[in-house]
Amino acid sequence: MTSAHLEAAEGGQSLAAVMEAQRDITRQLLSVARRQQRAIVDGDVEGLTASVEEAQIFLEHLQALETERMTALVAISMATGVDPETATLSEIAAALPADAAEAVRRTGQVLRAEAT
């Protein structure tokens, strides 16, 4: 296995893992938003304050994960030549070794299914 092939595989696995973590954090953030809504309706200032603080923590995690996602995309780009600014997830997966490509495709399919 060449160095570029290995870097592409590692980048693909990292990308899939980061996207899954982003999905999980986004689910938790949605739950917090629902609690915020209930707190507003109920006039629960303490509950609203606590949920705003919790949301801030999740947003910070998302920001860190976005940095990790971009790092994975840069690694993939350097190994494959795919432009991370314009490539679709399918195009990125097509440039990756089989195992990494499957992980990226699978994660993308889950995200698309949840978004609809």
Image (cartoon, helix red, strand yellow):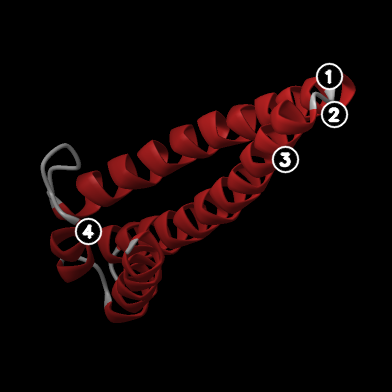
**x and y, in percent, of residue 42 in the image:** 79, 31
Which secondary structure lies at badge 2?
Answer: helix
Q: Which residue is mark 1?
A: 45
Local crowd size for mark 3, using a 10 Å CA cut-off: few (<14), some (14–19), many (≥20)? some
Question: Total number of numbered labels?
Answer: 4
- Separation of residues labelled 3 and 4 (CA atoms): 33 Å
Which one is in front, 46 or 18? 46
- Separation of residues labelled 1 and 2 (CA atoms): 5 Å
Q: Which residue is mark 2?
A: 47
Which is closer to the viewer, label 2 or label 4?
2
Q: Which residue is mark 3?
A: 35
* Residue at the image point whose x is 56% and y is 54% from the top: 21
* Residue at the image point whose x is 72% and y is 38% from the top: 38
- Separation of residues labelled 3 and 2 (CA atoms): 8 Å
Disc on the earlier residue, 1 or 4: 1
Q: Amino acid at mark 1?
A: Val
Which secondary structure lies at badge 1?
Answer: helix
Could you say which quadrant of the image residue 11 lies in? bottom left
* Residue at the image point whose x is 26% and y is 58% from the top: 4
Q: Which residue is mark 4?
A: 89
Q: Are marks 3 and 4 in contact (CB under 8 Å)?
A: no
Disc on the earlier residue, 3 or 2: 3
Could you say which quadrant of the image residue 54 lies in? top right
Which mark is on residue 91? none
- Separation of residues labelled 2 and 4 (CA atoms): 39 Å
Which secondary structure lies at badge 3?
Answer: helix
- Separation of residues labelled 1 and 3 (CA atoms): 12 Å
Q: Are marks 3 and 2 in contact (CB under 8 Å)?
A: yes
Which one is in front, 114 or 74? 114
